[in-house]
Image (cartoon, grey):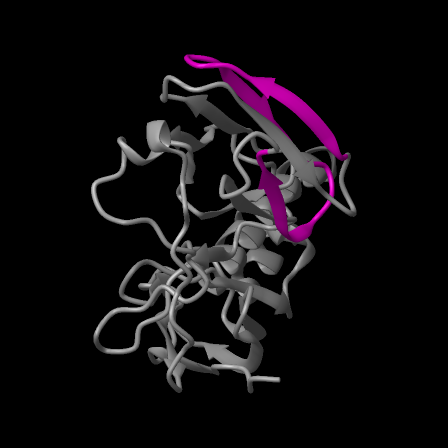
Amino acid sequence: MVRFARIHYRRLPSAFESKAMKPSLFILGFVLMFNLRSLGDGVEGRVTLRGIPPPEIPIQMSADCAQGQIQPTTTRHFVTNRDGGLANVLVVIRGGLWKEDQLAAPQNAVAMNCVACQLEPYVVAVRTGQPVLFRNDSRFQENLHFDARANRARNIGFPSGATYTATFDQAEDFIRIKGDMHPWFFGYVCVVDHPFFAVTGLDGKFQLPDGLYDGQYVLEAKHLKAGAAKMEITVRNGRTDPVEFRLEVPARK
């Protein structure tokens, strides 16, 4: 195909050469990029926890907050299922990305809701510049205290029925949002400067967005209590074999 294009180009009149060649190069480049882009199922897998985690600590809520809870409330340090799947793990590409992967941030907001004096979900992940919409669906006065390091720290009043939209300019793992009125009120926002990340669900499973070029990458799974692990993965024809991370319960001091 390339040889044919060159021969055809030489036969064109000189006045027409530059105008004809530009679309040809553009189409050729588009085809090459299209072929390199992954069109398969992308990168997916599971994170499990090895070892027996310490029991979660019961939260002694005030009576008015406790009335809104379906079951007794505890900390959420290690949320696992019966098969050992670990929730609330940030899974993210840490190395191997192309500059073309730094796409504009989506404008759809990721939601975090205040429900019965707690933030739900416990952990979310967004792009730099992507809005996070906080909504206070409870009948209680709260506040949102952003304990950020790379991003701007702030402390916002959050009355019942209020909404607040926050964005973050810098990549940062696990920004803690806490409430000063109720000490058990907190959650985490992870901010990533590219689109290829996910947070594991209750079964420990994850799937990164489609669109990775074929090639080699460094993938990391990071948890607040169980630490982090990295591995090299290879994307071929748009997919990898299922990825299995195994994090360990830290040794008790």
Q: Is residue 136 visible?
A: yes
How many numbered marks appear? 0
Q: Nearer the viewer, residue 115 or 17?
A: 115
Foreground residue among 205 and 121 = 121
Specify the quadrant that holds the C terminus. Answer: bottom right
Q: Residue 158: name its quadrant.
A: top right
Q: Is residue 165 magenta?
A: yes
Write down the quadrant of residue 222 in the picture.
bottom right
Up-down relation of residue 78 to residue 69 (above or below): below
Above or below residue 41? Residue 147 is above
Residue 103 appears in view: no
Name the spot of residue 89 as percent of width and height, x first: 46, 63
Report the residue at 41% width, 77% height from top. 53
Image coordinates of residue 129 in percent, x first then y, are 64, 33
Name the side, left or right, on which 12 lies relative to 50.
right
Instruction: Name the side, left or right, on which 28 lies relative to 116.
Output: right
Where is residue 164? Give x, y as percent. Answer: 54, 19
Task: Kindly identify the residue that appears in the image at 61 percent across and 37 percent down.
Answer: 104
What segment carries the magenta color?
153-179
